[in-house]
Image: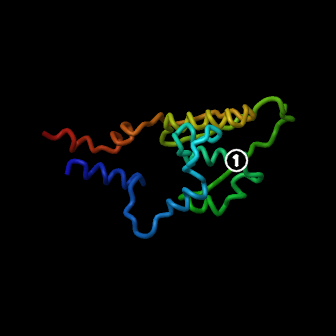
């Protein structure tokens, strides 16, 4: 019973949800190719032993799709929340020998695995893009679950 409030907090944060209908996870997994079976080192999933974080797949799509996220509206409709891509107009002609700088923001925290996958993506793109990561926190499973814990209950005798 001691973790009942923790589970309630997780539900309030959107990490747990009572399943009312069929889950969209299977479609999301297929559309974004989140699990790679062959285990090749030529994919960002290499950093996660076969799993590609959705956040990194979204960043990857900004380059792999000719029209960016607009080209994959069907896939994005599977995700909760709005999708928006902002491109800054070039102030001057960009030197093609210099890498583009991409600002990647993680609100709520980023895992070290996601950072490793972004580094792998930069390597796979042969340095054509550099990723500048902005985050509110580095997060791991222990930190995540401790932040959901109800301390008032956990400290009772």
- What secondary structure is marked by label 1? helix
Q: Residues within 10 Å of mark 1 (few under 14, many from 20)?
A: some
Q: Give left or right: position of 138 versus 18.
A: right
128 shown above or below 80:
above
- Residue situated furthest left in the rendering: 157
17 shown above or below 135:
below
Q: Give left or right: position of 60 versus 25.
A: right
- Residue situated furthest bottom in the rendering: 21
Between 33 and 59, the one lying in front of the other is 33
Q: Which residue is mark 1?
A: 62
In the image, what residue occupies the spot 72% across and 45% down? 63
In the image, what residue occupies the spot 35% across and 42% down? 145
Q: What percent of the width, then of the height, locates residue 84?
A: 65, 53
- Residue situated furthest top in the rendering: 98
* Coloration of the structure image: rainbow
Between 30 and 118, the one lying in front of the other is 30
Q: Give left or right: position of 115 versus 9.
A: right
Between 121 and 155, the one lying in front of the other is 121
Q: What percent of the width, then of the height, locates residue 110?
A: 50, 38
- Residue situated furthest right in the rendering: 93
- Residue 17, by quadrant, is bottom left
Q: What percent of the width, then of the height, locates residue 127?
A: 72, 31
Q: Quadrant of the C terminus?
A: top left
Q: What percent of the width, then of the height, locates residue 100?
A: 75, 35
In the image, what residue occupies the spot 57% across and 61% down? 78
Q: Give the total of numbered labels.
A: 1
């Amino acid at each position: 019973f001691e973790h009942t409030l923790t589970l309630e907090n997780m539900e309030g944060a959107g990490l747990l949800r009572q399943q009312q209908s069929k889950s969209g996870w299977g479609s999301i997994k297929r559309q974004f190719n989140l699990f790679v079976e062959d285990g090749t080192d030529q994919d960002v999933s290499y950093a996660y032993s076969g799993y590609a974080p959705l956040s990194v797949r979204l960043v990857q799509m900004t380059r792999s799709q000719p029209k960016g996220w607009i080209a994959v509206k069907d896939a994005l409709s599977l995700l909760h929340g709005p999708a928006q891509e902002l491109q800054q107009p070039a102030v001057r002609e960009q030197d093609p020998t210099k890498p583009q700088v991409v600002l990647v923001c993680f609100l709520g925290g980023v895992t070290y695995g996601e950072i490793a996958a972004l580094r792998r993506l930069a390597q796979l793109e042969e340095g054509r893009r550099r990723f500048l990561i902005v985050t509110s926190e580095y997060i791991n499973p222990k930190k995540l679950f401790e932040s959901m814990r109800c301390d008032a209950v956990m400290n009772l005798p």
